[in-house]
Image: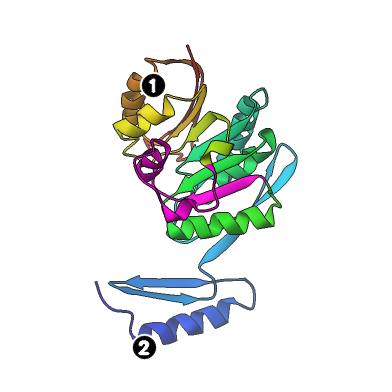
């Protein structure tokens, strides 16, 4: 609740100088309507997934999978699911491209959406760093994308993206704790195969009540992203009945 004043900045600069002889170190200070960055506001993470190194820019205060070792297990699990699948992939809530980049090699083309500007910026950086050429990421919410797919609205952000050119038979969703709204659930239910990544078992249960009307659960996994807490990450694979 206190502003970052000149005294704070002076002390942080002195601490950064003291530690920089041994470490590559960055500082970020936050207060009300204030952000001070000394150095970078991101880290670069390198994950080895099924023998392939993937590079991800992780920006401060942006959504990401926090546990690198468990994230590798999640990505390898998702790759295993996608090996026998064909055609194209649609991903909603893609963040910085964590899943879409790792899964791009399993599909002809991948289309992904994300609402956060900083996450989309990181996703574009990660696409270039990993030399992925068959992945497009657009800045849209799941609700907006549903409206676009249903022909209810047109968006300038979709300029140059021909939605009809995609043959997406698989959809991956990794929604926030609130889960998906009903219209998005309806959209997701149109796909042959569904990969649902969830950080909230309660909203996952609610959404599965909707999705299992048309699909069967084929595989289910639990990933302990948050050791020593009650929180849990889940992965569900569904296929049309």
The residue closer to the viewer here, 68 or 62, is 62
User: Do the numbered discs 2 and 1 sit on residues whose CB atoms are within 8 Å?
Assistant: no
* In magenta segment, residue 144: yes
Q: Is residue 198 above or below residue 13?
A: above
Q: Nearer the viewer, mark 2 or mark 1?
A: 1
Q: Nearer the viewer, residue 19 or 213?
A: 213
Whether residue 152 is visible, yes or no, is yes
Tell me the CA gap for discs 2 and 1. 55 Å
Above or below, 172 relative to 26: above
Instruction: Give 112 or 44, whichever is nearer the viewer.
Output: 112
Of residues 183 and 93, the one nearer the viewer is 183
**Residue 108 image position (x, y, % from top left):** 67, 36
Q: Residue at x 72, y 47 (%)?
A: 53
Q: Position of residue 13 (x, y in %)?
A: 49, 83
Task: Tell me the SS state at disc 2.
Answer: helix
Dot 1: element: helix
Q: Residue at x 57, y 62 (%)?
A: 43
Image quadrant where residue 70 sits: top right
**For this view, does 110 lie left or right of residue 147?**
right
Task: Please give the range of residues in magenta.
Answer: 134-162
65 displayed left or right of 186: right
> In the shown orientation, is residue 221 left or right of residue 148?
right
Q: Position of residue 115 (x, y in %)?
A: 41, 52
Mark number, residue 6:
2
- Is residue 82 one of those drawn in magenta? no
Where, quadrant-wise, is the N terminus in this rendering?
bottom left
Q: Residues within 10 Å of mark 1 (few under 14, many from 20)?
A: many
List the single residue furthest toward the top: 241
Q: Which mark is residue 211?
A: 1
């Amino acid at each position: 609740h206190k502003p970052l004043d000149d005294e704070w900045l002076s002390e942080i600069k002195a601490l950064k100088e003291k530690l920089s002889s041994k470490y590559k170190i960055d500082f970020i200070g936050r207060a009300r309507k204030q952000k001070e960055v000394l150095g970078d506001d991101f880290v670069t993470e390198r994950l080895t997934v099924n023998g392939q190194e993937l590079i991800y820019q992780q920006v401060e205060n942006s959504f990401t999978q926090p546990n690198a070792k468990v994230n590798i297990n999640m990505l390898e699990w998702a790759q295993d699911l996608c090996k026998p699948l064909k055609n194209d992939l649609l991903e909603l809530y893609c963040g910085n491209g964590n899943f879409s980049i790792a899964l791009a090699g399993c599909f002809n083309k991948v289309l992904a959406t994300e609402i956060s500007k900083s996450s989309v910026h990181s996703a574009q950086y990660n696409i270039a760093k990993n030399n992925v050429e068959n992945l497009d990421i657009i800045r849209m919410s799941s609700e907006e994308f549903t409206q676009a797919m249903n022909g209810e609205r047109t968006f300038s952000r979709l300029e140059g993206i021909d939605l009809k050119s995609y043959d997406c038979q698989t959809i991956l969703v990794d929604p926030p704790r609130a889960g998906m709204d009903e219209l998005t659930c309806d959209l997701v239910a149109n796909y042959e195969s569904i990969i649902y990544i969830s950080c909230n078992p309660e909203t996952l249960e609610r959404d599965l009540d909707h999705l299992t009307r048309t699909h069967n659960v084929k595989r289910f996994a639990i990933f302990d992203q948050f050791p020593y807490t009650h929180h849990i990450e889940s992965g569900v694979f569904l296929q049309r009945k």
